[in-house]
């Protein structure tokens, strides 16, 4: 396993390992595709590596099993649920199992991927475990939208931010994946230092298509062209397609708000971000960012894609009027 960039996050984890004060619960935050899952696996290696150093050796039996996701004491509850979702159906049995001693190691590590997709009931069910941890249980959460994690949990975890890579780091990583320099430049210009998104777009045209549609949608919203926006989004047929576009749309609005405020975008900085940052106020941009994230959080409950698109458009154009 190789980690690209993440200097600040790695330094903090190594500092915890050096002092022997690794937090019992970590929250790894960052945009989708930035490498939160890899960083979570790295932290698990750091806790269980046989050599017990400031960095995991990545070659002992413990590290290798974690890398292959077959370690009996590194649990991924997200992958245990129905269709990759957290539900209260599995939660009681899962919590009961945590009372038992670990299988092979001194500690058990539970990695909750996409914890921001967990409903409040599931989060509350875990609160007691985090609040009064047993000597042999550790917790790692990953989240794209930290605001969707309950404040009671936030106050009991240590946050580690997974930052996008610098341009130099990203181009070097893309070169290692055998991507030509001109294509690497294009990918970086679109997705910034988000290696996951760059690699996904390189492999699947649909990834780049959803990003392009999100940019076009953002421009239409900023220009108050509601009918054209609705017509364009209505071409989406599945929930997965709509989800991908909304995630990108959220990032466009968020980065535009950062540009408007004189700050740095947290990921890519596309032409659309620059354009709408000059057309809409930061208040409207942040409201659009919040609305797209709200729809993302509720999309599992909105079974009709067309109705969801219509409702999303209505909300967005209500903000810009």
Image (tube, grey):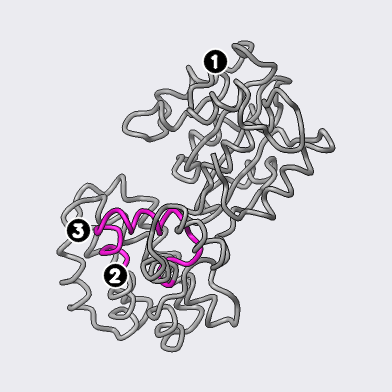
Q: Nearer the viewer, residue 189 or 34?
A: 189
Q: Residues within 10 Å of mark 2 (few under 14, many from 20)?
A: some
Residue 79 percent location from the top left of the image: 41, 30
Q: Residues within 10 Å of mark 3 (few under 14, many from 20)?
A: few
What is the distance, in whole Å, between disc 1 and disc 3 at their CAs? 40 Å
The residue labelled by disc 1 is 96
- Per the picture, the main secondary structure of the magenta-coloured stretch is helix
At a point 50% along the width and 54% down the height, the residue shown is: 34
Residue 112 percent location from the top left of the image: 52, 35
Q: Nearer the viewer, residue 133 or 204?
A: 204
What is the distance, in whole Å, between disc 2 and disc 1 at their CAs? 46 Å
Q: Quadrant of residue 197?
A: bottom left
Helix, strand or loop for disc 3:
helix
- Magenta-colored span: 189-213
The residue labelled by disc 3 is 307
Q: Residues within 10 Å of mark 1 (few under 14, many from 20)?
A: few
Residue 125 percent location from the top left of the image: 54, 29
| 252 vs 304: above or below | below
Q: Between tags 2 and 1, which lies in front?
A: 2
At a point 49% along the width and 40% down the height, the residue shown is: 120
The residue labelled by disc 2 is 212
Q: Between tags 3 and 2, which lies in front?
A: 2
């Amino acid at each position: 396993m190789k980690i690209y960039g993440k200097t600040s996050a790695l330094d903090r984890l190594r500092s915890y390992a050096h002092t022997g004060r690794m937090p019992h619960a970590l929250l790894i935050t960052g945009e989708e595709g930035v490498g939160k899952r890899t960083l979570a696996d790295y932290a698990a290696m750091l806790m269980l590596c046989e050599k017990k150093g400031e960095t995991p050796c990545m070659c002992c039996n413990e590290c290798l099993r974690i890398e292959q996701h077959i370690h009996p004491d590194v649990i991924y509850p997200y992958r245990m649920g129905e269709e990759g979702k957290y539900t209260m159906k599995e939660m009681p049995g899962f919590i009961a199992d945590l009372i038992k001693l670990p299988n092979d190691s001194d500690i058990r590590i539970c990695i909750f991927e996409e914890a921001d997709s967990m409903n409040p009931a599931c989060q509350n069910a875990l609160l007691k475990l985090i609040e009064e941890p047993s000597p042999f249980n550790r917790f790692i959460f990953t989240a794209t939208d930290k605001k969707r994690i309950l404040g009671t949990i936030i106050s009991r975890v240590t946050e580690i931010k997974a930052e996008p890579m610098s341009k130099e780091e990203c181009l070097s990583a893309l070169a290692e994946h055998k991507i030509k320099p001109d294509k690497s430049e294009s990918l970086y210009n679109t997705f910034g230092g988000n290696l996951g998104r760059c690699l996904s777009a390189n492999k699947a045209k649909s990834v780049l298509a959803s990003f392009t549609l999100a940019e076009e949608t953002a421009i239409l919203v900023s220009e108050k062209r509601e009918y054209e926006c609705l017509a364009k989004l209505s071409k989406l047929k599945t929930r997965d397609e709509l989800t991908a576009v909304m995630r990108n749309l959220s990032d466009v609005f968020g980065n535009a708000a950062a540009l408007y405020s004189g700050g740095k975008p947290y990921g890519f900085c596309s032409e659309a971000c620059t354009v709408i940052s000059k057309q809409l106020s930061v208040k409207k941009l942040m409201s659009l960012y919040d609305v797209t994230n709200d729809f993302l959080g509720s999309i599992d409950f909105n079974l009709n894609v067309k109705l969801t698109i219509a409702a999303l458009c209505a909300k967005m154009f209500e903000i810009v009027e």
